[in-house]
Image (tube, grey):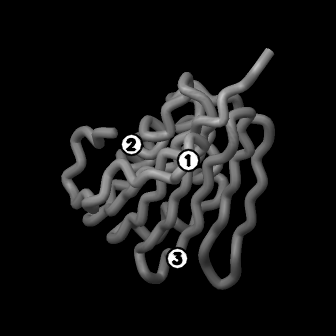
Amino acid sequence: MEFSTFGRHVAMDAWGVDFDLLNDVQRLEEHLKDAAKACGATVLSVQSHQFEPQGATVLVLLSESHLSIHTYPEKGFAALDCYTCGHTVDPMIAIEHMFNVLKPSQAYHKMLRRGVRPIEVVQPEPAIRPMKKMTV
């Protein structure tokens, strides 16, 4: 079987997010696993770390690649990242899921198409809340 090198990589910066949500590593783990499931990805493992005095990092290792969040609750900020290989899993669905969970006052995202050289920015303009449907 031959696999495609095609992949989509979505990054989102979310601002104005609730402190308590950004500082709850267990809740973030559950939300990221739900986001992975929503986009059709296969979760292989989850690793997380709760920082002191605040902040969290969660990495969801996917069969298709990864989904992650790094938070700065004191600034109301979260950096999210989802990269998936192939055509069957859509990382935008995972990012939209997390957007709906986090409910930021502002959010900016970019999508890169990778693996078909050169890397292509698909969505050059930042999206600002409200983000009803993020298009590819």
Residue at mark 1 to residue at mark 2: CA–CA distance: 26 Å
SS category of the residue bearing label 3: strand
Asked if residue 30 is positioned above or below residue 119 in the image, the reply reads above
Which residue occupies 50% across, 39% down? 91
The one of 98 and 135 positioned closer to us in this rendering: 135
Q: Residues within 10 Å of mark 2 (few under 14, many from 20)?
A: some
**Which comes before the other along the chain, label 3 or label 2?**
3
Quote the CA–CA distance across marks 3 and 2. Answer: 20 Å
Task: Give how far across and how far down residue 51 sits, in percent.
Answer: 70, 76
Residue 69 spot, x, y in % from top left: 58, 60
Residue, disc 3: 72
Q: In the rendered image, which quarter is residue 77 located in? A: bottom left
Q: Alpha carbon of mark 3 to alpha carbon of mark 1: how far? A: 34 Å
> Residue 121, relative to residue 78: is it above or below?
above
What residue sits right under mark 2 in the picture?
Answer: 96
Numbered disc 2: secondary structure: helix
For the residues labelled 3 and 1, say whether their Cβ atoms are less than 8 Å apart: no
Residue lying furthest top: 1
Which of the two discs, 3 and 2, sits closer to the camera?
2
Under tag 1, what secondary structure? loop
Q: Amino acid at mark 2?
A: Glu
Question: Looking at this view, is 87 or 4 the one in front?
Answer: 4
Residue drawn where x is 39% and y is 64% of the image: 14
Circle 1 residue = 117
